[in-house]
Every structure is written in C-alpha cells, then in structure tokens.
Image (cartoon, rainbow, N blue to C red):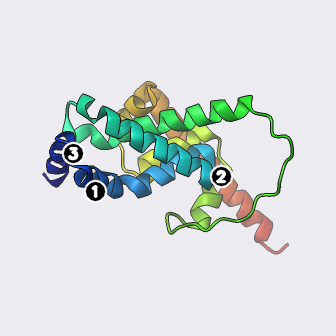
Amino acid sequence: MEMESLIARAKEGDADAFAALIQKHMKAMYKVGWSILKNDEDVADAIQDAILTAFERLDQLKESRVFPSWLTRILVNKCYDLLRMKTRVVPMEILPEEPTPDAGYGNVEWKEALSGLEEKYRLILILYYIEGFKTGEIGQILEIPEATVRTRLSRGRKQLFVMYHEEGAERRPV
C-alpha cells in the first residue's frame, strides 16, 4: 500500500512523494541501465532522462502496481535512445577511460560475469534474477513475446555456464 500512497501523492504534485518512489527504485534502475550501456556516466544520463519523463507522464500511469515495470520501460527506451545518439556521433579523439567509483550499486564480480554476455541476454538475466520480474512482465517491458524472453533467459544461462567453466578451466593447474 505504501507505493500506491506515494504514487497517489505524486500524481497530486507532491515532489517529495515522487522522490521517495524514485529512491526506492534507483538501485534497480542503475542495474538495468548498466546492463545496456555499460558506462556509469551514460547510465546516469539515461536515469536522469527517465526520471524526468516519468515525472512528466505520471498522470498517464493507470495502475499503481505496474509502476516498477512502467519506470523500467521508460529507462530501457532512454538507454536505447542514448545508444542511437552515440552511434551518430564520431569522437574526434579517444581518451582512456578513468575508473569511476561504483557508488555502492553493484559489485565487480557481478559486472564482470554479465559483461561477457550479449546485451539481449544480459538485460533479461538482470530483469529476471536481480529485479525479480516475471517472464511475462519482461516481455511487456521489452515489447517482445514471452517465449522470446524464456529463450533468451535459457541461452543467457548457458552462456554464463560456459563462460564460468572456461574461466575455471584456465585457472586449474595442468
């Protein structure tokens, strides 16, 4: 009920209620954004755009219970928008990336394990295992059939399994 109350207050213009809603979902938003963009600065930009869009369109949310998937869908769209913009821009010079602090939103092992997967598998694994969405909800968020979600989930698991066992084989003494 607390989320429904916050949404109702936010729809009435209560900025604090909206901020509390976003704060509850910030960690999940970061993980989803990172699974697509793999760059903390780009993730921050996409999250900022998603928050602004959600605030502007909150009155369009019909059912409070779908707020997490609605917000995630907005974020996914913003991430893909950002990727499309980046492919149009050719940098004049390439600078080495400087390490950025993790801000406590994830751990290195989690990022390393998922970074080797294709984006379509990485995103579904994060939404399913980390964010707890059901396959039907993931299908709605990503606008793909539920059967495709299940297939990608299975293939993503297999890729992780193969990567994990190959890495383990490299470490074993011969």
* Element type where label 1 sits in the image: helix
Instruction: Give the residue number, with chain letter if any, for mark 2.
Output: 115
- CA separation, marks 3 and 2? 36 Å
For image coordinates 34% across by 52% down, the residue present is 22
Q: Amino acid at mark 2?
A: Ser
Q: Amino acid at mark 3?
A: Ala
Mark 3 in CB contact with mark 2 (< 8 angstroms): no
Residue 46: assigned label: none
- Residue 12, position in %: x, y? 16, 41
Image position of 33 (left or right of 62): right
Front residue of this view, candidates 159 and 108: 108
- Residue 121, position in %: x, y? 57, 41
Image position of 57 (left or right of 92): left
Instruction: Give the residue number, with chain letter if any, for mark 3.
Output: 10
Mark 2 in CB contact with mark 1 (< 8 angstroms): no
Neighbours of disc 2 within 10 Å: few (<14), some (14-19), many (20+): some
In the depicted structure, whether residue 114 falls above or below residue 68: below
Front residue of this view, candidates 52 and 113: 52
- CA separation, marks 2 and 1? 30 Å
- Residue 134, position in %: x, y? 35, 41
Instruction: Give the residue number, with chain letter if any, for mark 1.
Output: 20
